[in-house]
Image: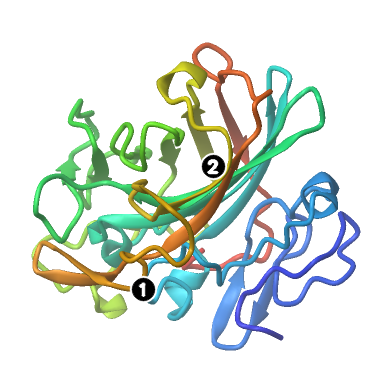
Amino acid sequence: SADGDIHAGDAAGRGYDGYALASCRVAHGDRPAHEHGDAPPQWVLDAGYDPMFTHDAGTPGENVAAYKHTAFKGWAGRFGAVDWYGVFHLDTNPIGQAGRFHSYQLWMRDATGAVSHFNGWLDFGVGDSAGSQKVVVCGSDSQVRPIIMVNQAGCPVRFENWYARAGGSGAWAPDVGFNINPTYYDIGGGDPADPAQWKPINGFANNVDRRVEWAWYAGRSSIRGEFWATQWGDVVSGPDAPVCGTARTIGGRSYTVLCLRQVIAPTLPSIEFPGNSVQRTFPAGGVVLPN
């Protein structure tokens, strides 16, 4: 099968290549058995989109290693009068927790049937730092934002908190946060890039209890229709804008500037508290770590 791509299909699984439906956990290539949450709803496909794990807004190497690929999670839901589908990179292992940027793709269908599409990078860091603002706790909480809050080994098990920087992808973009039962404990002073040093919480699959909270504020930006923006939310003139393909350095690391197509329907209403969060347990039968 392909390397984790989602190809056009429907809820029955027609046409999927390397994508594990919520009801079907699979191993392919060097990937262990894992799940990717919800398949794309038919309305996303009917709108002309073909959701993929390898996509224009992906971060460098995001779909390469087995433990990176398995972090892609699809999620379909409805907030008020808006149907939505997202593909989020929930990389709940030490190297993923250290990463500042994780991609997202989000589609929304409003009551008129118009489909909006947002994609870019969620920012879990601050200032000129290469890594995330990672906070290690022992069964407690932290009000730091943005944050990837990780539990210390040997402490009471609790969800990881992933809250991206509000407005981090531009005023026109959604604010996004997650609470996830984690795949691995933190590794202390070990090497986060060495899976052999990761300390699993227990023997069964985690990263299946997931809560997402996102908001989109119609009055925060007047941008509507089709436009182009970088992965950090800076609006550009189009796919051939001078900045596209150039380099930007953050925390000593060089990134290629991506220019990404966005669509915001004029009829899209605000989605905000209350009624903008949901928690689910995704099927885990046959899934092994990492998931």
Q: Earlier in the sequence, mark 2 or mark 1?
A: 1
Drawn side of residue 141 relative to residue 2, left or right: left
Callout 2 secondary element: strand
Drawn side of residue 105 relative to residue 136, left or right: right
Above or below residue 156? Residue 94 is: below
Total labels drawn: 2
Callout 1 secondary element: loop
Q: Quadrant of residue 79?
A: top right
Q: Quadrant of residue 76?
A: top right
Mark nearest the camera among 2 and 1 is: 1
Q: State which quarter of the image contains the N terminus.
A: bottom right
Could you tell me residue 204's position as x and y percent? 52, 59
Q: Residue at x 20, y 25 (%)?
A: 143
Residue where numbered disc 2 is placed: 209
Residue where numbered disc 1 is placed: 60
Foreground residue among 102 and 120:
120
Q: CA distance from mark 2 to mark 1?
A: 27 Å
